[in-house]
């Protein structure tokens, strides 16, 4: 039934994360957390939702990401991968990841052709094919938008820096 | 205006195979291919329809031959432009059983519904004087809507209630996606001033027994507002015979262009209603202190109108009228049956709405167990099948069924059994692709 482009879009990594998501389940901040931020984001065109909590320690390092959501496999898998990528990163590391992932989404499926970027993104490179489908880019970015907003609500970052 | 249509109907009133082929040939876009040269299977007419040549030609012809400002100027072009504009009004009005003086052009159906709500708002502030008092709302008054409304026939009433102090109430929905007619007597009361409801749900496809709603509204003296966006393109609709006070429908869903829709209102209501958008073209005498307003429909058509789109919508109404709405409805009911069969044939797929074609249109929304609607739509798209995914601007209805999103396949006059077969084949592979349990 399906042609190659579906396998390209729905890489096994994405299907696995969608089925067995990492970091799912909201809760209270761990002991290492100095501050916690939370954000609820909705994609109004399709009703996808993500609520994301982020804990940071005194040094501004992400200690935990917890989330709850409902939506398509792209949106849910993307938050799961985000969880794996940003835990233990400092703010500068999170920024680099977020910017690189956004660049990947804007590459219209071509990828970034940058070894450093690919190393950085790890599992998230599986989302390369999403960029070919402009309607789905928003799905893949939903969790990243929530993270960016949660960092602001945590007080770790001023709105104008975001 | 000519159509390539053969004027030969199938014996039972449906479109014959030859007629259907001729109809498809009228819609140039249907012949295009998608990625990897796949043919297009367009099952998203509920969102917007494709346009026949006669509509495209009418819009272009207006600009090539008749373009001028309407209702002003004394030159020949202006006269011809005005004539084309008003002929279109008469055609569209006639198509829905109305007179030209009862049809107001709006930019879309949402604007038509908001026009009614804001006219009532203005009447509630005393605008329109004694004649408009019947439109005034205040504390203690109630506005009744339904749980299956498109947001366009819900949010304007929420806002009107908030502005006037009136209370918003609603009629519920049955498990098979129909309106709870049994709730009319309890929810619609002497306090009800407005009863706003859909003629056909854009999600469940259920057709409302309008006569029951109108009868109850008349018993209590409430005004009825019908959202006819889904019904007008797909079944015969006679608004005067239905007896509703107001109705809204859009042009682009009935094979016309975007940018134009219409508000129908009984003439005596339009005459009594205060204006909403004010400015040029809708006035009689303007002084520095005060203004008197033109009679309807011009009173509600301030500023430059969407003339070429209105003219093209007139061509669309003519096109549908030539086909015959009974034949269109019969054809689409057949497509509804095929779509329902297709969905029922795939394990793990559940229809949100009636599962047979009785009082039902050919927009079929469904849930695929274990697969989000967006992912369903993506796999269908890969097979060239265009469907709508999401909440279809009816979040409360989706909440009622405990789902965030559905996939919707919706037919139009040009939909064929082959389209439905392609849809069925693509849908059959969805659950296995995502490794859903039991697939």
Image: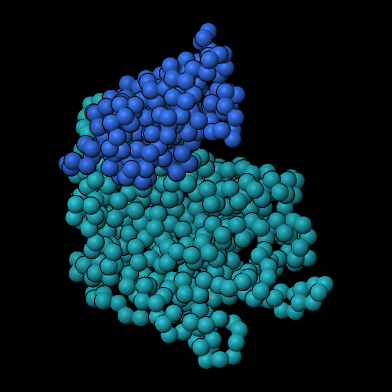
Chain colours: A blue, B cyan
> Measured from the top left, where is residue B189 in percent x and y?
65, 47
Of the pair A15 and B386, the residue shown nearer to us: A15
Answer yes or no: is residue A96 visible: yes
Q: Residue furthest right?
A: B289
Asked whether B390 or B63 is in front, the reply is B63
Q: Quadrant of residue A37?
A: top right
Q: Residue at x 27, y 42 (%)?
A: A110
Using the rendered image of the protein, determine whether residue A18 is visible from the camera's viewpoint.
Answer: no
Q: Which quarter of the image is occupied by the C terminus of chain A?
A: top right
Going by the image, does A87 lie left or right of B193? left
At 75% from the left and 66% from the top, the residue drawn is B128
**Quarter occupied by the N terminus of chain A:** top left
Asked whether, in this view, residue B329 is left or right of residue B138, the answer is: left
B154 vs A112: above or below: below
- Residue B361, image x and y in percent? 37, 53
Residue closest to the eye, B174 or B306: B306
Q: Position of residue B97 (x, y in %)?
A: 49, 70
Q: Position of residue B66 (x, y in %)?
A: 46, 84
> Which residue is the extreme one toward the top?
A31
Vertical comparison of A98 with B226: above or below? above
**Residue placed at 52% from the left, 42% from the top?**
B147
Above or below, comparing residue B290 to residue A142 in the picture: below
Quadrant position of residue B365: top left
Label count reads 0
Residue at figure coordinates x 19%, y 52% from the top left: B36
């Amino acid at each position: 039934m399906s042609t190659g482009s579906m396998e390209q879009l729905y890489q096994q990594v994405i299907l696995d994360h969608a089925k067995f998501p990492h970091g799912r389940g909201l809760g209270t901040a761990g002991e290492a957390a100095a501050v916690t931020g939370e954000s609820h984001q909705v994609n109004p065109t399709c009703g996808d939702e993500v609520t994301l909590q982020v804990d940071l320690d005194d040094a501004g390092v992400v200690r935990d990401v917890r989330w709850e959501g409902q939506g398509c496999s792209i949106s849910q898998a993307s938050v799961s991968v985000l969880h794996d990528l940003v835990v233990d990163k400092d703010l500068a590391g999170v920024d680099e990841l977020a910017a690189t992932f956004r660049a990947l989404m804007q590459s219209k499926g071509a990828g970034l052709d940058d070894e450093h970027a690919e190393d950085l993104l790890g599992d998230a490179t599986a989302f390369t094919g999403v960029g070919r489908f402009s309607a789905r880019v928003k799905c893949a970015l939903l969790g990243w938008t929530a993270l960016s907003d949660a960092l602001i609500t945590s007080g770790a970052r001023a709105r104008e820096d975001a | 205006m000519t159509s390539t249509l053969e004027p030969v109907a199938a014996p039972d009133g449906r479109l014959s195979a030859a007629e259907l082929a001729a109809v498809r040939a009228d819609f140039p876009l249907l012949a295009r291919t998608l990625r990897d040269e796949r043919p297009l299977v367009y099952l998203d007419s509920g969102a917007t329809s494709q346009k026949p040549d006669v509509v495209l030609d009418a819009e272009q012809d207006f600009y090539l031959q008749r373009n001028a400002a309407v209702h002003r100027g004394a030159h020949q072009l202006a006269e011809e432009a005005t004539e084309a504009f008003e002929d279109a009004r008469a055609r569209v009005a006639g198509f829905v059983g109305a007179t030209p003086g009862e049809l107001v052009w709006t930019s879309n159906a949402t604007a038509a519904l908001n026009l009614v709500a804001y006219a009532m708002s203005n009447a509630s502030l005393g605008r329109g004087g004694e004649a408009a008092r019947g439109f005034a709302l205040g504390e203690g008054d109630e506005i009744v809507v339904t749980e299956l409304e498109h947001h366009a026939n819900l949010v304007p009433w929420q806002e009107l209630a908030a502005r006037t102090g009136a209370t918003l109430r609603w009629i519920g929905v049955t498990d098979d996606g129909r309106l709870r007619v049994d709730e009319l007597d309890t929810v619609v009361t002497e306090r009800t001033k407005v009863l706003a409801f859909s003629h056909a749900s854009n999600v469940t496809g259920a057709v409302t027994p309008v006569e029951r709603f109108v009868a109850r509204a008349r018993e209590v003296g409430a005004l009825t507002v019908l959202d006819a966006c889904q019904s007008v393109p797909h079944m015969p609709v006679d608004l005067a015979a239905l007896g509703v006070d107001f109705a809204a429908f859009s042009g682009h869903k009935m094979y016309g262009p975007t940018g134009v829709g219409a508000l129908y209102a009984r003439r005596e209501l339009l005459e009594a209603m205060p204006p909403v958008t004010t400015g040029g073209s809708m006035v009689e005498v303007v002084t520095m202190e005060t203004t008197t307003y033109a009679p309807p429909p011009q009173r509600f058509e301030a500023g430059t109108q969407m003339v070429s789109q209105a003219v093209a919508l007139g061509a669309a109404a003519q096109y549908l009228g030539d086909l015959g709405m009974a034949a269109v409805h019969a054809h689409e009911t057949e497509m509804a049956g095929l779509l329902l069969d297709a969905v029922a044939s795939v394990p793990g797929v559940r229809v949100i709405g009636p599962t047979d074609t009785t009082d039902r249109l050919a927009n079929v929304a469904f849930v695929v167990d274990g697969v989000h609607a967006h992912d369903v739509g993506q796999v269908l798209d890969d097979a060239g099948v265009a469907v709508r995914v999401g909440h279809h601007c009816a979040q409360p209805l989706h909440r009622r069924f405990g789902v965030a999103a559905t996939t919707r396949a919706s037919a139009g006059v040009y939909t064929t059994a082959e389209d439905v077969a392609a849809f069925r084949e693509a849908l059959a592979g969805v659950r296995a692709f995502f490794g859903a349990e039991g697939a």
